[in-house]
Amino acid sequence: MMPKQKGILVIISGPSGSGKGTIVKELIQKERYALSISVTTRKPRFTEEEGIHYFFRTHEQFQEMIEQGEMLEYADFCGNYYGTPKSYVEEQLQNGKDVILEIEVQGALQVKSLYAESIFVFVIPPTLDELRSRLTHRGTEDECIIEKRIKRALEEIKLIAQYDYVVTNDVILKAVSDIHSIVRAEHLKPKRNEIWKEYTKGDDH
Amino acid sequence: MMPKQKGILVIISGPSGSGKGTIVKELIQKERYALSISVTTRKPRFTEEEGIHYFFRTHEQFQEMIEQGEMLEYADFCGNYYGTPKSYVEEQLQNGKDVILEIEVQGALQVKSLYAESIFVFVIPPTLDELRSRLTHRGTEDECIIEKRIKRALEEIKLIAQYDYVVTNDVILKAVSDIHSIVRAEHLKPKRNEIWKEYTKGDDH
């Protein structure tokens, strides 16, 4: 029996309107994936459960985790901290699960420096017009916010060359299937697929 | 309309008994692939056609092609030359076809220095016992030749770390599907999937 292959940390980023959230929901339908669970200092909402939606911690505890180097990445948003705990991700990877982490470009670049072995996927809509259209049809935002989001999307897209893969989200199931192919291919790299080392073990005697 | 993406040169190697030939036959059933056609100086056999099975050339013509740098790689086998012509491969790649080139490890390493953009796939049977069993059950070779092939396989397997991907050929259709995933994933790398550059074109004005 070959030992179980360690999982891969799959970072998914993309501008608002890229549909990355929907893609992630589809991906984790497959048993081989685990979704990274964030730590936050904000109060749980009525339906939210500890260890399922978030790990809820106090500001002090969060600060302590940062100092102890227990965070893969973190950010401050509207007075609350949000972060990705190393221990949970590491545990899932050891269990052979591919861990999906949906984070912003800035957070992703933080992770890259810590986990060189992780893979970085950038999701974009097929065209800029389509992005504009998706943001507009949400209907919840005014023109100024939409323009800001588009400007930010263009800034983020400039960083694509730092990602390993670019997935166009035109048809959602096609995009999901693209990501499955990426993860499958990555598991076949010689550094991960070490079946060949078994062959040369007998070489010593 | 996005311009058609250029094809990828896919190099497939593996020891005798790995089943790479069968895998290649399955792969090229898909229209997106083209099989590289070799140039040879040996005489055509009765059923062989120019430009389908081989490009048949004289020794002089072959020597000329080498001198003109028209060969991706070549080797001398039993007094005849066999080689991969750059022009045919290049033409297929420009037409958006992924070109499959099944060659030995030594030839593969020659190609690597010329076509850094190509991808290198190594096919191995699941275990050394299985390799031995496949070579034995061919029934055409004596024990001495089988042992030589196994020794050579072990030498080749040591070079796996220089390949991009290792595919285990346990179930043939699984191995074929692995290679489809690899090629699909490679097309999604930012250097090849340049859809994102369309987004920033408008940035000038």
Image: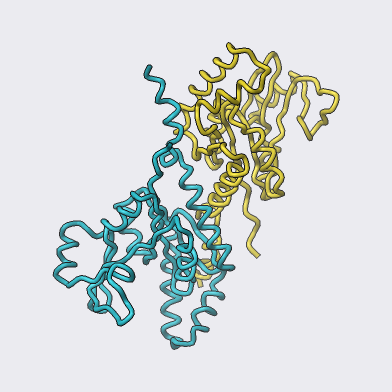
Chain colours: A cyan, B yellow
At 38% across and 54% down in the image, what residue appears?
A: A9
Say whether residue A174 is left or right of residue A75: right
Image quarter of residue A107: bottom left
- The residue furthest right is B46
**x, y percent for residue A131:** 52, 74
Left or right placement of residue A141 versus residue A127 in this view = left
Whether residue B75 is visible to the viewer of this picture, yes or no, is yes
**Viewport quadrant of the C terminus of chain A:** top left
Q: Quadrant of residue B110?
A: top right
Residue at the image position 51 percent from the left and 18 percent from the top:
B151
From the viewer's perspective, is residue A91 above or below residue B2?
above
Q: Residue at x 58, y 17 (%)?
A: B146
Give percent across and percent down for residue B19.
62, 32
Residue A74, relative to residue B80: is it above or below? below
Asked if residue A161 can be seen in this view, the reply is no
Image x and y of residue A175, in percent? 54, 63
Where residue A54 sits, quadrant-wise, is bottom left
